[in-house]
Every structure is written in structure tokens, then in C-alpha cells.
């Protein structure tokens, strides 16, 4: 029996990350799932993954902390190298730039952008050594076109797009694929309080997206054998950004 593939989901206990973890489990991946501190949500997701016949290992740490990231994943990746890595972790601290506090700016950049560096610093050399892998970065429509009240968030998500394009040029020859998925307005806890009456007219499809619609694209990028998509930005936004 061939060895099962392994997917590492960064920020996988809820919302889009959970949907991605479940979709990849259905595709036959065992799952490493990271989260910060919502233990009940992580345990619930773990049970759902295991019910699909896949193993699930949980890692609880703050990805904005370089040392904590190294401690959590360093030994694990010495022994086992994930076949797919999905960087989904991210926070929002929305405010108009004129009122934005230093903490609101720093916390978003530290988690969303510096966190990507911290994760890849642990994973990239083992992946290069194995000469294989799929890296999918979850950015945002806000990183493509900007959004008022989200200067910090838009900056962090645009930074991920730039990082992905550069990284794709570095690692493509080693059979490591790097791509970015940019969700628009997706039905999650983060979007529950958004004014739908103002946003829906801006979306040609006339509705918010579903987490499963993001997960299906990520699953394709992680599983497709006939693969020539590399260094690309794929929008999942119902036409919000065209």
C-alpha cells in the first residue's frame, strides 16, 4: 500500500482552514493542523478529519513568534516532510489608517506576513531536500485591490502575494509549486457582521462565497498530477475583483 500524503494546514481549526483540512482529508491526506489557542475548535476539527479515515496531529502555537514556531514544527519536519503546505493563518484589526494604532498595525503584519516567514523558515529546506511539494498561500481580494479600513490587512495580504511570486522563482526548479488563492467575501465568523446590503451589489454573482468553494481550489492545487500552474494568483470572489 502506498504511503499516504501529508498536508500541513497553518490555521486550520475553523472557517476556511477547517474546510481545506476536511477537503484534503477526503482526498486521502493525513493532516497536520496548527492553531493558536482555540482548543475546543481544534479538537472538534480533528475528530471530523479522523472520521474521514485520515490521521490528524494538532500543533498549538503563535506563528508570529519565531522561536515558538521553530519549537513546534522543527523536530516534526526533521522526521517527516509535508507534501502540501497551506498557509491560511491570518487576523484582521480593521481601522481607518488615520486612527490605526501601532498595535493594530504590528499585530496584523506580525501574524499574516511575518508568520509566513516563520513557517517557511522551518519547512523550506526539508522540502528542497526532498525536491517536491505544493505550497498554497491564502491571501485575499483585499491584497489585490485594497480595502478602506484595512490598510494593515491589505498590506499584509499584498505582501504574501509578492512573497509567493518571488518564492516561486526560487523553488520551481526543485519541483515545488507555489501558488496563491485570494478569497473574496466568504461566509465565516470573520464576515458575520459585515453589511451585506452594501457589499452584495458589488459582487456580480450576488452572494457571499462558501468555504467549500475555496477549499475545492486549494485541493486542486495540492492534488492535480498534470500540473503547470506555478506562481499564479487565483481569485475566488464571485467577480468582486475582475
Image: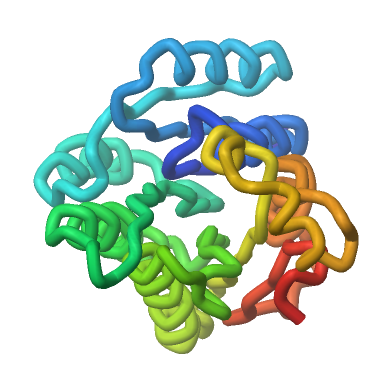
| Above or below: residue 5 compared with residue 132 | above
Name the residue at 75% across, 72% down.
Answer: 227
Q: Which of the image's four quarters has the N terminus?
A: top right
Q: Which of the image's four quarters has the C terminus?
A: bottom right
Name the residue at 66% across, 35% down.
Answer: 19
Residue 118 seen anywhere in this rendered image of the structure:
no
Q: How is the image coloured?
A: rainbow
In the image shown, does 146 or 81 lie closer to the viewer? 146
Name the residue at 43% across, 82% down.
Answer: 162
Count of numbered badges drawn on the protein: 0
In the image shown, does 67 or 78 lie closer to the viewer? 67
Name the residue at 41% across, 79% down.
Answer: 167
Question: Percent x, y for residue 139?
Answer: 52, 64
Question: Percent x, y for residue 204?
Answer: 87, 67
Is residue 32 found left or right of 204 in the rendered image? Answer: left
Residue 167 seen anywhere in this rendered image of the structure:
yes
Is residue 241 found left or right of 73 in the rendered image? Answer: right
Question: Percent x, y for residue 156?
Answer: 36, 68
Question: Percent x, y for residue 155?
Answer: 36, 73
Q: Residue furthest right?
A: 205
In the image shown, does 40 or 28 lie closer to the viewer? 40
In the image shown, does 134 or 242 lie closer to the viewer? 242
| Above or below: residue 4 compared with residue 165 | above
| Above or below: residue 50 compared with residue 58 | above
Amino acid at each position: 500500500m502506498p504511503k499516504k500524503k501529508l498536508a500541513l494546514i497553518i490555521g486550520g481549526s475553523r472557517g476556511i482552514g477547517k474546510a481545506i483540512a476536511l477537503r484534503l482529508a477526503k482526498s486521502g491526506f493525513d493532516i497536520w493542523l496548527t492553531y493558536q489557542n482555540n482548543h475546543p475548535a481544534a479538537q472538534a476539527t480533528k475528530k471530523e478529519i479522523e472520521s474521514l479515515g485520515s490521521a490528524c496531529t494538532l500543533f498549538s502555537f503563535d506563528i508570529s513568534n519565531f522561536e515558538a514556531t521553530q519549537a513546534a514544527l522543527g523536530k516534526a519536519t526533521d522526521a517527516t516532510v509535508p507534501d502540501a503546505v497551506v498557509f491560511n493563518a491570518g487576523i484582521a484589526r480593521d481601522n481607518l489608517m488615520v486612527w490605526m494604532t501601532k498595535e493594530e498595525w504590528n499585530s496584523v503584519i506580525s501574524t499574516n506576513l511575518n508568520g509566513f516567514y516563520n513557517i517557511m523558515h522551518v519547512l523550506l529546506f526539508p522540502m528542497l531536500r526532498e525536491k517536491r511539494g505544493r505550497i498554497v498561500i491564502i491571501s485575499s481580494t483585499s491584497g489585490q485591490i485594497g480595502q478602506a479600513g484595512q490598510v494593515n490587512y491589505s498590506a499584509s495580504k499584498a505582501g504574501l502575494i509578492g512573497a509567493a511570486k518571488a518564492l516561486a522563482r526560487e523553488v520551481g526548479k526543485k519541483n515545488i509549486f507555489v501558488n496563491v488563492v485570494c478569497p473574496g467575501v466568504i461566509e465565516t465568523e470573520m464576515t458575520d457582521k459585515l453589511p451585506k446590503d452594501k457589499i452584495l451589489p458589488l459582487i456580480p454573482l450576488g452572494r457571499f462565497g462558501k468555504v467549500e468553494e475555496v477549499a475545492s481550489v486549494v485541493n486542486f492545487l495540492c492534488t492535480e498530477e498534470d500540473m503547470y500552474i506555478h506562481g499564479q494568483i487565483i481569485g475566488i470572489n464571485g467577480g468582486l475583483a475582475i
